[in-house]
Image (spheres, helix red, strand yellow):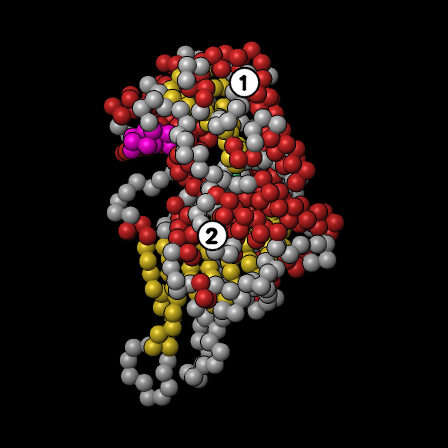
Amino acid sequence: MTTACTFVLFGATGDLARRMLFPSLYFLHAEGFLADEQRIVATSRSDRSDEDFRDSVRGWVEERSGEWFDPEVFEDFARRISYVPVDAGEPADFEKLAEHLSGGCAEDVVFYLSTSPSIFGAVCSGLKDAGLTKAPNRIVVEKPIGHDLESNVRINETVAEAFSEDRTFRIDHYLGKETVQNLIALRFGNRIFEPLWNAQAIESVQISIAEMVGAEGRGGYYDEYGAIRDMMQNHLLQLLCLVAMEPPASLGADSVRNEKVKVLRSLAEITPDNVEQRTVRGQYEGGYDENGGRAASYTEDVGNPDSDTESYVAIQAEVENWRWAGVPFYLETGKRMAERRTQIVIRFRPVPHSIFGAETDPNELIIVLQPEERITLQIMNKKPGLTEEGMPLQELGLNLSLSEHAGGERRRIAYEQLILDALKNNPTLFVQRDEQEAAWRWIDGIVNAWEARNMRPRRYRSGGGGPSAKHSLTERNGHSWNE
Ligand code: BG6
């Protein structure tokens, strides 16, 4: 495995660079994951000196790392950073960048594009013309990679003209989260789940990502994408893949990613004929924010009074294969919900025959990924105390709090692992092109069906549980959301 010598960041003054990328690089440095000779080259359009730029980085890192900030460590870290102005439309700027990288470091470079995809093409051809795209140099691209399958293919093709697929790293930051990787550990590091991980034992699966934040501050982008493209196409479907995939032969990139793509290709198509039963779109109204203050409505937040974009979506997905035939996967994500919570609920089938004179509650394996990391297994127990007749039962949870076992360790930024993997040339946690295309194909089907049926979002209260129509989605099958 090679370890890149230089990390070149395009979009180095953007929001992601400030909040996530520089703080992640700082922590990688602080914890000794960066080799001495590794350099960080920041680029954006404006003209800045190294010193001036390092000062900005200091402010961003300090703000993000809080009590974990160490000024001396930062000074050491800052020595790795240099700044080169690059305008993506200026070939001469790429020549200057190449010159800056020369002297050994142009040989093994990670180019990280934290920019709008509209300039991916210009950046890739600029790098190519400047002779910077030869192996093992590689590229990392951020979402959104397209708005639908067609634009996704177009962007992927542009990138492919400069970097081969094995040197293209597509980020889904959920895959960098410790808790998400833990799903792989839970499923394949334990013997007890696998015999039950199928349609014979499992009745339904629920995957939810609820957020309290709204679309404020990023209205332009969000209003064009909506919840289905912003969250469902990537994060939710990645979680679905990790829950539903077959055991991979190894942790190697191809093994894991090939299993994921099979899941995506097995998703039953949603069509105009079933879209009204299988999906719910919602848009938040004004209400109360987390502090009890007045919260603006979606249309106010994005500054578009006529917007029909959804800030909430729920889908009943079906994975059509032997393992999962007939098991509904309820997927849900929304903004301005009552609480921030990402969780997966595996609901098992009820016992085939109850000897207790009453129905027993089905077992549930609840995996909470955010805000705290917890795994709970809901099991039936005898209610303590004397009984004159029968045996009354109660449901109790077997609880594993992963945060308690982390021993007060700092909560990592998802990007730390992903940047480290890109530097180490390990693509396992990145999204393959065919995986992304399969996801877009399925999402396009839903969006087209919405259009065909003129299905507009239903309103829901800010700070509530989402549109009430979401309950019909599950109740139709005799199920309910675990909230
Ligand atoms: C991003 C979406 O990809 O993920 C945002 O664009 C969303 O709309 C964010 O808020 C959620 O990520 P996290 O890590 O806060 O759960």
Camera-nearest residue between 56 and 154: 154
Query: Left of 315 or right of it: where is 100?
Result: left
Q: Which residue occupies 41% across, 17% down?
A: 104
Q: Residue 238 at what x, y percent from top left? A: 52, 48
Q: Quadrant of residue 88?
A: top right
The rendered magenta stretch, by its main secondary structure, is classed as helix
Identified by mark 2, the residue type is Ala
Query: Left of 458 or right of it: where is 425?
Result: left
Camera-nearest residue between 437 and 239: 437
Q: Is residue 372 magenta?
A: no
Identified by mark 1, the residue type is Gly
Q: Secondary structure at mark 2?
A: loop
The numbered mark, 1 or 2, whose residue comes first in the sequence reads 1
Camera-nearest residue between 137 and 305: 137
Q: Residue 158 at what x, y percent from top left? A: 63, 29
User: CB of mark 1 within 8 Å of CB of mark 2?
Assistant: no
Q: Secondary structure at mark 1?
A: loop
Question: Gap in Å between the C-alphas at discs 1 and 2?
Answer: 37 Å
Residue farthest toward the bottom in the current orientation of the protein: 388
How would you rate the neighbour count of disc 1 (Cα within 10 Å): few for under 14, some for 14-19, many for 20 or more? some
Q: Quadrant of residue 229?
A: top right
Q: Quadrant of residue 120?
A: top right
Mark 1 lies on residue: 131
Give the residues in magenta.
23-34
Mark 2 lies on residue: 249
Q: Which residue occupies 28% across, 51% down?
A: 405
Q: Which residue occupies 53% across, 39% down?
A: 215
Q: Any atom of ligand 1 within 8 Å of the CB at mark 1?
A: no
Q: Residue 294 at what x, y percent from top left? A: 48, 42
